[in-house]
Amino acid sequence: MTRKVAMPQNGKAATSRRSPNRRFMFSQGIIAAMKITAIETYPVSIALKPEYQMITSLGVHDVSNYLLVRVLTDGGVDGAGEATVSEKWSGETVVGAKWLIENVLSPMVVSCDPFDIEELDRRMDSVCRHNWFAKSAIEMACWDIQGKATNKPVYELLGGACRSLSIRCRFSMGAYEPDRARTRALQLVEQGFDTIKVKTGTKPEIDLARVRAVREAIGPDRNLMIDANCGWGVETAIRCINELEDCNLWLVEQPTPDGDYEGLARVRRETRPPVMADDICFDMSHARNLIHHESCDLISLYPGKNGGIRKAKAIAEFAAANGVACSIGSNLEYEIATAAMCHLVVATPNMKIEEYPGDILGPAYHVNGVTKRPMKIEGPITTITDAPGLGVEVDWDRLK
């Protein structure tokens, strides 16, 4: 089995940016089929910068735990992936994801063609339910391999760029005390942010005071949204959102508990701001339920949460066919998964980040990185390059 690929303009076979002495299996524009030969796993723990500390209805988040993966092939090219795990949110842990990949997923995907993402997903889904972030780490690494092997950025493999490689983002602020929230909001305005998300879902009276403090700080013309992370019940959500009518909320994210599609639909009917679903939508069956119940105006997607780039893009396309927009969400991804998020946004028309800016700022929240060259994040703007694959070069020796 062979696969046609575009040759570089200089006519020479592409070589790995990480291993310049190893060449892919090119011959007159033809590359032989690759097979996955092994998957390496690297647990990492990285602190958030103090000013970026995240507080939500789930508790305080000041250290991020990740499982990075390196997928190796017999074609002499490897790919990088990232499982952005959170036991309080998705239920996944570094220890669990590492064990699952090494003992369940890896035996199924070794020998799989990294270009056949549907078969890769079929194999992983056949031996394990859910565990979206662990699966996505392997999947995004295979897109990275494809891009390096064909000398193309991942967004080209997904259909080509439909928007700029520089993406304007909103800022997600923790559920701080009102005075701290006010001070932080003023700092964000100075940094150029015009859309700010405030975490709620804690004690309603403090939530309301926090949101009002931020609105006062940022003025009437910037976008203000809230995210309860399933922390409110339906009645509380309706009451709080309506009490914040004077704050002119631009968007309300996941105000009600996980699994309550009818409750979310009721909030949408009985309040004014558009409603975005996030914590309630991990896979296509969830998206179908959201649309069947007319629960939301918008769906938050990202490769880790949805089990991979392909599955996230499929949900975005399904939502588009049903007249529902999508945007990009975040689990405070690090550099590899952040790059995957950007490629999804750049290549997917229904990721409506122009109307609904998303969260692609995870690396900026943390004190250090794992790549040889940091991603370009300046204030609200995150930019990827047209480098092959995901465009990030992991320092594997440092991780070891």
Image (cartoon, grey):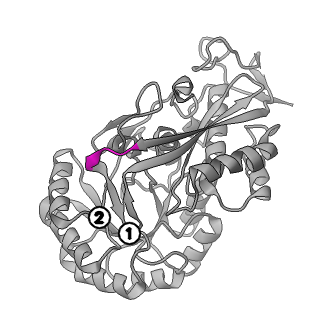
Q: Is residue 48 magenta?
A: yes
Disc 1, disc 2: CB below 8 Å? yes
Residue at screen point 75% across, 34% down: 38
Q: Is residue 113 visible?
A: yes
The image shows residue 15, relative to residue 37, as above or below, that is above
Q: Secondary structure at mark 2?
A: loop
Between 389 and 374, the one nearer to me in the picture? 374
| Location of the N terminus (image quadrant) | top right
Q: Is residue 120 visible?
A: no
Disc ID at residue 57:
1
Three-letter amino acid code of the residue under disc 2: Ala
Which of the 4 image quarters holds residue 270? bottom left
Between 250 and 70, the one nearer to me in the picture? 70
Query: Is 276 displayed left or right of 83 in the figure?
Result: left
Query: Is 2 displayed left or right of 186 in the figure?
Result: right
Disc ID at residue 175:
2
> Local crowd at mark 2 within 10 Å, few (<14), some, or many (≥20)?
many
> Local crowd at mark 1 within 10 Å, few (<14), some, or many (≥20)?
some
| Location of the C terminus (image quadrant) | top right
Where is residue 274 shown, x and y percent of the image? Answer: 37, 73
Which of the 4 image quarters holds residue 222? bottom left
